[in-house]
Amino acid sequence: MDFEQVIMELLINAGEARSHAMSAIQAARRREWQQADEALAASAEASKAAHRIQTQLIGADEGEGKLPVTLILVHAQDHLMNAMLCRDLAEEIVLLRKELLA
């Protein structure tokens, strides 16, 4: 496993998940419900891809500190956490806008 490449993939997928979540909110503001739903689905897929990478890293570490905890790894984990929270909130915001405006 190329540790740096795996971390970069985690960062990329987390960033993509967050970007799609924000796009969903923007689409909902414009009342473009199908586009909002598609962006939420894309966010979920990117989040799942990032989570698979995270699971791979956890498995490689085996809870024994086998992987180095670098600043970039912590940064990637932070991005993933924020992306997942952003997606969850985006889902709620889109639903609220639909309830109020659709």
Image (tube, rainbow, N blue to C red):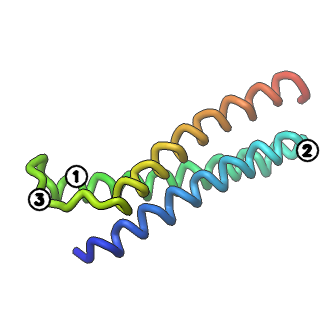
Q: Which residue is mark 3?
A: 66
Q: How many marks?
A: 3
- The residues tagged by marks 3 and 2 sit, at their Cα atoms, a distance apart of 48 Å
- The residues tagged by marks 3 and 1 sit, at their Cα atoms, a distance apart of 10 Å
Does residue 15 appear to the left or right of 64 in the view shown?
right
Between 24 and 67, the one lying in front of the other is: 67
Residue 95 to residue 73: above or below = above
Q: Residue furthest top?
A: 100
Q: Which residue is mark 2?
A: 30
Does residue 57 appear to the left or right of 44 in the view shown?
left
Taking the spot 58% from the left edge, 35% from the top edge, the residue there is 88
Q: Quadrant of residue 19?
A: bottom right
Taking the spot 46% from the left edge, 43% from the top edge, the residue there is 81
Give coordinates of residue 55: x percent, y percent: 28, 52
Q: Which residue is mark 1?
A: 58
Q: Residues within 10 Å of mark 3 (few under 14, many from 20)?
A: few
Give coordinates of residue 61: x percent, y percent: 15, 55
Instruction: Give, as a three-letter code, the residue at label 2.
Output: Arg
Q: Considering only order in the chain, which callout, 1 or 2, is on the residue closer to the N terminus?
A: 2
Q: Are the residues tagged 3 and 2 within 8 Å (C-beta)?
A: no
Q: Residues within 10 Å of mark 1 (few under 14, many from 20)?
A: some
Instruction: Give, as a three-letter code, the residue at label 3.
Output: Lys
Give coordinates of residue 51: x percent, y percent: 39, 51
Does residue 6 appear to the left or right of 34 in the view shown?
left
- SS at circle 1: helix
- SS at circle 3: loop
Name the mark nearer the viewer: 3 or 2. Answer: 3
Q: Considering only order in the chain, which callout, 1 or 3, is on the residue closer to the N terminus?
A: 1
- SS at circle 2: loop
